[in-house]
Structures are given as structure tokens and as C-alpha cells.
Image: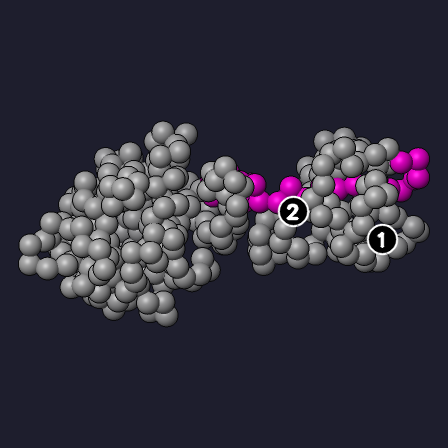
């Protein structure tokens, strides 16, 4: 936990995902001796021994917490998200209003966290909807928003176009974020980095980072712009460049250039293909391939980050 004391009435409490085992939570004192207007009813009341028990309460949606201290006990009233006009001055001593700011971060790099894990992010969505994403906050400077993750064979990646478009799996395990979200991210921000990282069963590890990664809209079949290698193993970066400017293919939508068939059917997983070679990130777990890392990959992930 990180405490930042700005003044006697302004306090930010940051609870890491590790402590909460869920999403990041941030609370802020609006003003001492404030309260929620009487026409709002709390959806939860609790009497606890410590205000921290209120802050550690696992509630996944934006809300306010009003804390009233009465001797050694604290009464916590939880309200649905309300307008600032619903907050009023209160002459009653001991009332403190905390606002739950929720996870309003767009990408993993916007989080005030150095802990890897699953967070709920807007991904830059104007609607403010939240998506669970695995964030790598430690490797290569941290702040990596993972859009593909394979750690075992428990999730089937032999999926149709709609699944690859919208995403599937669970962020705390194996998952694919979704081509449409990936397109929105790469076109919302000017310069996006992509990192491809893989580890083999014998412990070997490699990665590449490319600058200028983009995914076109569905009307162009989510065509890939691989970007320019800026960091990592050149030979594997060259392997990633092989699929530059190619469209995404699934078993039910053949957009590759291979005249002998559908690469997604042959690879048993969707992807950007040139001639069904070099890269099969979404093949069955035991058959994942990336250049020299063939049939020996223990884990692989693809993640994005906006260049500052």
C-alpha cells in the first residue's frame, strides 16, 4: 500500500491488485465534514473496527464510501456513483467522504502499480466500459498491455472470426483480447510499440520490441503493420516482419496469400499469415512456433505500449 498525504483533508490510498486480489482501487477524501445528500440510499452499510476495512471491500463498480467515526467503531456507507452535486457540507464532526475512482486507466502504463496482474482498463474506450487485461509491469520498463497470452493448453485457440474479433479466454490465464480492441488501441494513439516475448521449456527466453505497430479496421481484415525493430533479438524480429502487411485469417475467413489452402486450418489457429510459415502463435499449445522456437515454447505473449 502506498500512502500519499497531501494535507489534513486530502489523502490518496492506493491498494495494489496483489492486496485486493482484484482490480486497483483508489480513494480520495473529497473534503472533511462532507456527506451524501439524504435523498440517496446506500446499497451497503457496514460497521467495522478500521476504515481500511471499508477500503478493502471488494466491490467492482464505481462507488462512494462515506465513513462516520463513532469512538472506536466506523460506520461505512457505500453509495452508487453519484454526481458531485450530491455531496454537501455537513456540520456533523467525524464524517469523511471518500470517492472510489475505480480503474479509469486506459492502458497498463497508466496504472500506478509495479505489480503484474489483471486490471480492468478502458483501453481508451469513449464509452468508459472496462475490460480485464493482464498487465506486465516489470519487464522492459513495465506498462505492457497484453493482448495475447499462452501459458498452457487449457484454452482452445482454434476459433472462428467472431471470436478473434471480440476476444476469448481469461486474462489471468490464456486469452486473446480481440482484434477490434487492438485496432481501436493502435489507431487511437500515434505511436504504439509491440513486444513479442517467448520462453522455452529449457528456460531460454527471447523478445523483440517493434515501434509503429498498427492493426487496420475489420473492413481491411485487420491488416497488420509490424513496425520497426527497436530492441531485442534481430533474427526473431525478422521473423515477425515476415507477416507485415498481411491480413488476419481464421478457419472460416481465408484472407492469407497461400494458394494451397487456408493457413488457419493448417496451423489450427487464427493469425496473420504469409505462406503458413514462420509464426504460429495461436496454434495448439504444443505446436506454437516462432522462428527457431519450434514446438518447444512454454509461454508466449504479445503486448502493446504507447511510446511516450
Q: Secondary structure at mark 1?
A: strand
Q: Which circle marks residue 250 in the picture?
A: none
Q: Which residues are magenta?
A: 90-113
Q: Left or right: 246 with respect to 230? A: left
Q: In this orientation, which residue lies closer to the viewer: 18 or 214?
A: 214
Can residue 173 be seen here? The reply is yes
The percent coordinates of residue 190 (x first, y second) are: 36, 29
Where is 229 relative to 280, above or below? above
Please say which color scheme the image uses. Answer: one colour
Q: In this orientation, which residue lies closer to the viewer: 244 or 221?
A: 221
Which residue, given by chain and number where applicable, does mark 1 sit on? 75
Identify the residue at horizontal 22%, vertical 55% (top origin): 253
The percent coordinates of residue 45 (x first, y second) are: 81, 56
The percent coordinates of residue 213 (x first, y second) are: 29, 38
Closer to the chain start, of discs 1 and 2, is: 2
Residue 109 falls inside the magenta stretch: yes
Separation of residues labelled 1 and 2 (CA atoms): 19 Å
Main secondary structure type of the part rendered in magenta:
loop
Identify the residue at horizontal 38%, vertical 40% (top origin): 184
Where is 9 relative to 13, above or below? above
Which residue, given by chain and number where applicable, does mark 2 sit on? 62
Q: Tell me which corner region of the image, top left, top right, bottom left or bottom right, holds residue 60.
A: bottom right
Q: Tell me which corner region of the image, top left, top right, bottom left or bottom right, holds residue 181.
A: top left
Amino acid at each position: 500500500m502506498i500512502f500519499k498525504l497531501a494535507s489534513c483533508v486530502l489523502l490518496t490510498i492506493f491498494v495494489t491488485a496483489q492486496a485486493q486480489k482484484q482490480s486497483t482501487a483508489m480513494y480520495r477524501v473529497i473534503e472533511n465534514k462532507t456527506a451524501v445528500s439524504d435523498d440517496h440510499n446506500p446499497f451497503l452499510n457496514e460497521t467495522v473496527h478500521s476504515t481500511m476495512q471499508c477500503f478493502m471491500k471488494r466491490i467492482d463498480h464505481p462507488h462512494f464510501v462515506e465513513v462516520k467515526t463513532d469512538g472506536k467503531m466506523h460506520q461505512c456507507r457505500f453509495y452508487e456513483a453519484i454526481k458531485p452535486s450530491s455531496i454537501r457540507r455537513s456540520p456533523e464532526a467525524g464524517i469523511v467522504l471518500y470517492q472510489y475512482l475505480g480503474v479509469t486507466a486506459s492502458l497498463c502504463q497508466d496504472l500506478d502499480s509495479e505489480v503484474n496482474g489483471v486490471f480492468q482498463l478502458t483501453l481508451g474506450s469513449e464509452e468508459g466500459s472496462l475490460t480485464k487485461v493482464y498487465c506486465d509491469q516489470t519487464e522492459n520498463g513495465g506498462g505492457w498491455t497484453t493482448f495475447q497470452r499462452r501459458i498452457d493448453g487449457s484454452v482452445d485457440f482454434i476459433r472462428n472470426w467472431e471470436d478473434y474479433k471480440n476476444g476469448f479466454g481469461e486474462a489471468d490465464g490464456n486469452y486473446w483480447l480481440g482484434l477490434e480492441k487492438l485496432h481501436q488501441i493502435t489507431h487511437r494513439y500515434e505511436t504504439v510499440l509491440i513486444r513479442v516475448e517467448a520462453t522455452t521449456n529449457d528456460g531460454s527466453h527471447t523478445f523483440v520490441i517493434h515501434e509503429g505497430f498498427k492493426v487496420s479496421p475489420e473492413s481491411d481484415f485487420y491488416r497488420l503493420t509490424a513496425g520497426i525493430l527497436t530492441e531485442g533479438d534481430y533474427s526473431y524480429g525478422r521473423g515477425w516482419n515476415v507477416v507485415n502487411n498481411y491480413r488476419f485469417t481464421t478457419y472460416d475467413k481465408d484472407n492469407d496469400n497461400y494458394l494451397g489452402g487456408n493457413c488457419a486450418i493448417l496451423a489450427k489457429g487464427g493469425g496473420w499469415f504469409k505462406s503458413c510459415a514462420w509464426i504460429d502463435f495461436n496454434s495448439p499449445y504444443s505446436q506454437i512456433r516462432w522462428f527457431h522456437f519450434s514446438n518447444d515454447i512454454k509461454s508466449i505473449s504479445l503486448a502493446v505500449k504507447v511510446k511516450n
